[in-house]
Image (cartoon, grey):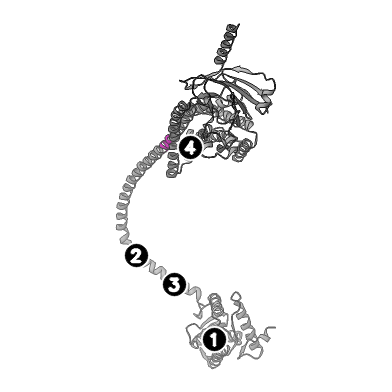
Amino acid sequence: MLRLMLSLLLLLSSFIACSAVTISESFDAEHRVKLDYTLSKYASLNELLSEPVEWHQSARLPTGLRPNKKYLWLKIELHNASSAVKPILVSINNNLLDAVTAYHVRPNHPILTVDSGDALPLIKRPLKYEALIVPLELQPQTQSQLYLQLSDEGVINAPITIWEPNAYLKHKSKFNLIFGILAGFILALALTNVTLYNVTRKRYFLYATVFTSLVWLLNAHLYGFGYRYFYSSWQWFQQYGQGIMTLSLSLLLLPQLHFCSGKQLLSHPTLSDSWVKLVVMLLLVSVVTLPVSFSILLALSVSLIITILLTYSVVRLTHPRRNALLAVLLCHFILVSYPLTVEVGIQSGSFLHHVGYFGIFTLETTLLCYLVVHLYIHQRDEKLASQQRRLAHTQAEDALLKEKLKLQEQAQYDLESSIESRTFELQVTLRELEDKNRELERMNMEDPLTKVKNRGYFDKRLQMEARRSRREQTVLSLIIFDIDHFKKINDQYGHLAGDQAICEFANLIKSHLRRPHDEVFRYGGEEFILLLPNTSEAGACEVAERVRMATAELVIEIGEHQLTMTTSAGVYSAIVSDPHNPQLYTDNADKALYQAKQQGRNRVITFQTNQEN
């Protein structure tokens, strides 16, 4: 009977050892961890263990598990077969899980509870590390259970590996070395592009800089380095960062491929820039406001649609770099479609945390940078070729121009030889023309009978003197003379005698001018105007009186007859207040002349203000 019980106990121990993770002296790592899982509404281990639970045994966690407001519980049997305390590290290879709580149930020890997850600040994690690590210690020759409570808003992807600490450090050192090389390479590409943008000011280098920087940041986010080093206390970005950066990369890919292909991809006449910007803004707002699971699904779905449409557009192109464009789109398709299949539960998601996933990002970024550099070289070569063509064209034009200049010089020499003989004749003709022009100008200003200035010139001179009077605030005087009873002279002695009388009267007025600016004008018929700038009323009256007295003493010999005559004068003197109305002077002087005629002629009358009416 005792032998039978020992056999049963041995068989039970063997069964437990087979289903448990055995930690031996030479243990390094266990990648295919056997576990039991269940979906439960219970939030604590005590509630879970107090009720009957249906556990499902599996070598790995099935794909497509979505808690839907429940908790995913994992149970792992741990057996320390060695004779010493064995520290182990339980690695959950998904840095984006919202919450992870580990319960280590050990015989004769209190339950050890460890909290982790990206919803937890880095400072509260058991290890300040980029990965989700649960450190445990297994007592020698003991059997213990590890319960993991996982919660996430989307599909739970949680590949589990159990490590011996030194083995994990070796593995992580190798992984970090490869990751650092790839990340450094991508960062170098970003710095190269921003340098090229600063030098060339080409926008496609700026887009390449932003795209490469986003690739670098997205991979740092996926592998936990972003949360560890950059935004450890910003849990919101840790949860929404994947969707935001994935959508941004896909949206940036459109203008970048447009530059590289030289074609307007995904364009339509009805789609204006304002509509495109509105759609982009709505997508980004939706990604940051929806629940995390829907946000990632939306970002990945839109990115996949953009990638497929871009691929269709590029396939239809005839372009020398079409294969490189398709390679970029193929990489982007893999990078977008794989996490989308994980989110909908088709794939397990283990490749997301493999360095090969980062390698595809690196390949895509390298190809894209190659395309923009090749585009710049192509544009530079085209510019140089265009400059060379323009230079050759310019040289040909210069040669033709030199030949034309040579012919022109010869023609110019011949022309100058023929012109020199005619230059003197032309100069003589020009002098004659100048003399005639001066004569015409003089005739245009002078009265042909009296040789004094005519009325047309008087109007211009009056306008000029009115402006000067207004500007300098000096008195301008104007005298109108009229020969008395001139019609009788014409009737008694004839018109020739009248013309002679007018000429004698004009010469008499000129003989009484003393200053260079004083000038006499024939106003019409027997009327003459004397313009006296900067002359007071008294001075003007004195000049008018001298002319009147000299006229009365004048004797004109006409054949056997002696002709005498008198003159009347109207004087107006004032400082000009309105230079645009110089006719006021002639009107007022004419009114004064009219008064002189009315008062008996042969007299000088000055215009007074009370005479205006």
Judging depth in this view, the residue of 362 and 98 nearest the camera is 98
| Label 3 vs label 4, nearer the camera | 4
Q: Is residue 465 above or below residue 22?
A: below
Image coordinates for residue 454, horizontal then vertical, percent: 53, 77
Q: Amino acid at mark 1?
A: Thr
Q: Amino acid at mark 3?
A: Arg
Spatial distance from mark 1 to mark 3, Cα to Cα?
31 Å
Residue that numbered label 3 is attached to:
438
Spatial distance from mark 1 to mark 4, Cα to Cα?
87 Å
Which badge, 2 or 3, comes first in the chain's sequence?
Answer: 2
Q: Amino acid at mark 4?
A: Ala
Residue that numbered label 4 is attached to:
208
Where does the magenta region start and end? 373-379
Describe the element under mark 3 as helix, strand or loop: helix
Judging depth in this view, the residue of 406 and 65 nearest the camera is 65
- Is 258 covered by the magenta stretch? no
